[in-house]
Image: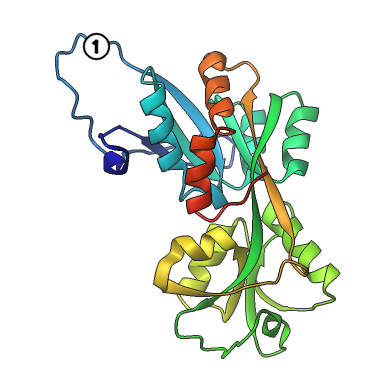
């Protein structure tokens, strides 16, 4: 909610679902009520729809609230999905104003297809092995993920989390027993939390956001792989000026403080 920032600000969230047609199907959920005056004469804020990489879903509301306090003329409406899925949806005509991806490669594809303009890097993330709180596989270190008896969930090829996981396994010469290939890190984390697998490869921020429902096995920096988050305005957005202000905001010290508390590193 917005109380952490001294006032209550509305953040509207949609959940992205890739339908058979490839378009965005959304359901609107209010995260907090607006306690401002009910005069009915106030100008309604402009809704800025932002496609957000799934690994940033736990921090986007805090960023949105902070931005809206600085820019009260805007309401940020986040939609989360895999970065690759979001690019596909924009290409199919999904009504997004801004895009946040995990990984420069996916954003590069969006630029090449002329779907977005002037992307800006603003944060980074690295990988961690997540295990259920009860640790049924009895893992004691991150390399135990390669034990033949350990069932592992990971992102499928395509999403940035899949590419990053491939890099981690290749550079450390590890082979894992893949039990599940998932569309994004949130799906991987759910399998770990519900003990469908012994371990999952996710981002550091996912383990932090899960609290006590999972445990994390840290990967030393010398062995780890990081990914960079970028934001850009969607080409043809009807609210490109305000969307650009949100993209700029993500590179500010105010946004960096929020991101750091959530476990993200600098770009």
Q: Is residue 225 above or below residue 77?
A: below
Of 187 and 18, nearer the camera is: 187
Q: Between residue 56 and residue 198, name the one nearer to us.
A: 56
Front residue of 28/75: it is 75
**Relative side of 230 to 94, left or right:** right
Q: Quadrant of the C terminus?
A: top right
Q: How is the image coloured?
A: rainbow
| Label 1 crowd bin: few (<14), some (14–19), many (20+), radius 10 Å | few
* Left or right of 6 in this view: 174: right
Going by the image, does 263 lie left or right of 26? right
Camera sees residue 203:
yes
Instruction: Point out residue 78 in the picture as x, y percentages from the top left corner.
Output: 46, 36
Is 109 placed above or below 147 here? above
Tell me the quarter of the picture where residue 31 sits. top left
The residue beneath circle 1 is 42
Give the SS element for disc 1. loop
Q: Residue at x 49, y 53 (%)?
A: 262
* Residue 136 in picture, x, y percent from top left: 51, 89
Q: Quadrant of the N terminus?
A: top left
């Amino acid at each position: 909610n917005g109380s952490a920032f001294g006032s209550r600000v509305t953040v509207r969230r949609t959940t992205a679902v890739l339908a058979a047609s490839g378009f965005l199907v959304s359901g609107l959920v209010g995260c907090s009520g607006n306690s401002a005056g009910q005069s009915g004469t106030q100008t309604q804020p402009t809704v800025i729809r932002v496609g957000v990489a799934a690994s940033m879903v736990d921090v986007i509301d805090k960023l949105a609230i902070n931005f809206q306090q600085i820019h009260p003329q805007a309401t940020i409406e986040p939609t989360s999905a895999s970065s690759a899925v979001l690019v596909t949806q924009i290409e199919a005509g999904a009504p997004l104003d801004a895009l946040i991806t995990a990984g420069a490669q996916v954003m590069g594809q969006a630029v090449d297809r002329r779907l977005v303009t002037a992307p800006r890097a603003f944060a980074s993330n690295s990988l961690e092995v997540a295990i259920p709180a009860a640790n049924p596989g009895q893992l004691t270190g991150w390399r135990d993920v390669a034990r033949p008896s350990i069932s592992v969930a990971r992102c499928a090829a395509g999403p940035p989390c899949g590419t990053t996981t491939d890099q981690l396994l290749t550079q450390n010469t590890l082979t894992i027993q893949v039990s599940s290939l998932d569309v994004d890190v949130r799906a991987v984390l759910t399998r770990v939390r519900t003990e469908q697998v012994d371990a999952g490869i996710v981002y550091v921020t996912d383990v932090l956001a899960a609290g006590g429902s999972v445990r994390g096995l840290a990967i030393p920096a010398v062995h780890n792989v990081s990914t960079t988050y970028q934001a850009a305005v969607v080409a043809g957005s009807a609210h490109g000026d305000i969307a650009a202000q949100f993209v700029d905001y993500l590179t500010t010290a105010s946004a960096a403080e929020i991101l750091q508390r959530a476990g993200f590193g600098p770009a």
